[in-house]
Amino acid sequence: MQRRDLFLRLSRIAAVMAWQQVFPTGARAQSPHDAAWASSGDPFPLGVASGEPQSDSVVLWTRLAPMPLQADGGMPQASVPVRWEIATDARFTQVVRQGVIVAEPAVAHSVHVLVEGLASGRTYHYRFEAGGHRSPVGRTRTAPDPAEPVQQLRMALASCQHYEHGYFTAHREIAASDVDLVLFVGDYIYTTDTPGHIRVRSHAHEMDPNPAGRTLADYRIHHANYKLDDDLRASHAAHPWLMVWDDHEVMPDYTGDTAPGVDDQRAFLAARAAAYKAYFEHMPVSPRRVPFEASMPMQGRYRWGRLADLWTLDTRQYRDAALCTEWPRALMHGKLLWRCEAIKSDQRTFLGHQQEDWLAAGLAGSDANWRFVVQTTQIAPWLIRSPMGPLTYAEGWDAFPMARARMMQAIAQPRVQDVVFLGGDVHRHVAANLRLDPFDRASPVIASEVVATSITSKGMSEVANAWVREGNPDVLHMRSDQRGHVLLDVTPREVRCVFRGTPHPVQPQSKLRTQATFVIERGKPGLRKA
Ligand code: FE
Ligand code: CA
């Protein structure tokens, strides 16, 4: 096991080095291909992005694709040098770092520049240049010094942006907001359409629902399609992002190395490898995350001075397979489970045992004012009492009750206080208190949960919400009729959560309004309405 680990790590480092050879500033690889692609138009229609800020570094991203809806982006099968620069001012009179990185055809001419040696707690501006073209300017930020007593952190929490279900107006608001970080918690792309559902626009390209029919080219075109949206590009260019993924980046409801209704596991793993690779190629994630075969390391840890520690979790790649997927154990297309005892095994894991231990150890060692656990979905149980007995939601933590109990145990340790879970996936705004034992009203509230509704993806019916609210009085707020995001204003004293929303489907010119505001006071787990 250890040897395999070491081998994986070395392979990854070699892969990174192969396309991270930095040329001396100003160097140009002249090739006969150069002129052809450079004259075919702007190579930066997918924009620029940044992410994973630390106190001394940040990742800058772009991808050269003058013909973005072609699988090769309209680029030759050749390496192309890309110049990057980062400055303290938007006019680039104070450039603090610059270099040349090679964009390789093997990664769709994407570049992931890990810029190190930056000052802490600062705003920076960055841009790229290739083939005589200049990219748009992006703005980013480094985290404050880990020891600094920071007074404020502002974040936007978002997820679930089905391109066909509405316009990305929420991103326009995020782009214009004064936030330090954007937390995007999954379902960045959707690879399936929803027949019979309202559609305000169409994907440029349709994907085979069957994994055997999907290729890397399919996923690349799909990602490019999303990045061509002006509001999404603006949101990336305005702020650094921290990202986790959910199922739709690969295939609906997949769990680890299997997907429901897919018999050919090998074909599924090949599709997963293609999906992870295309995801890497299109996101402002660290070059250290470069996928190897069908896996890609996604979890991360970040710190915002002494104010906050943040963990970003991968709840898909290591998740155990769904159980009881056959009728009559599974109802509503496998979304609800009935009398499925097998899910109660304590062997079952949602995060993978390694990631579980890593999170527990990190939480125990954290000395920040706040601990934010950033993951995909809702943790507060949906207790659906039906005439046939209780039904369990199959797609989230509810189907992994022992894994959730272990995570709650880790939080119940006396040293681990002021924990806030941030999630998405369920297409509704949720504010909930989390108890050590969620099924026991006498058990103490030990953490708070905030879930952001979708940017565009259709929400569930009010009937379903009513079931959930009725079954779980710790759910203080739940609305699925609006699309939007959550603004989180963090100070040493409190976290203010502003649920922003607009009716479904989102129209291009729609304005978001505040649906509700909740406050979490430090030292007092749980939310209260402001
Ligand atoms: Fe979703
Ligand atoms: Ca999802």
Image (tube, helix red, strand yellow):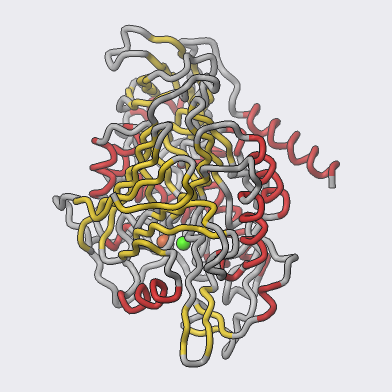
Identified at 28% across, 63% down, the residue is 165
Residue 319: x percent and y percent? 64, 61
Identity of the residue drawn at 43% across and 37% down: 241
Figure check: 324 above or below 387: above
Q: Position of residue 304 (x, y in %)?
A: 48, 29
Q: Which residue is nearer to you in this view: 112 or 418?
A: 418
Location of residue 94 by image quarter? top left
Q: Considering depth in this image, is 355 or 189 the residue closer to the camera?
A: 355
Would residue 349 appear left or right of 192 to someone viewing this image?
Answer: right
Query: In the rendered image of this protein, does residue 392 appear above or below residue 522?
Result: below
Query: Could one spot residue 36 in this view of the protein?
Result: no
Residue closer to the observer: 79 or 455: 455
Looking at the image, which residue is at 66% across and 54% down? Answer: 409
Question: Is 225 situated left or right of 507 in this image?
Answer: right
* Quarter holding residue 316: bottom right
Residue at the image position 32 percent from the left and 32 percent from the top: 238
Residue 423 spot, x, y in % from top left: 45, 53
Residue 490 visible? The answer is yes
Figure label count:
0
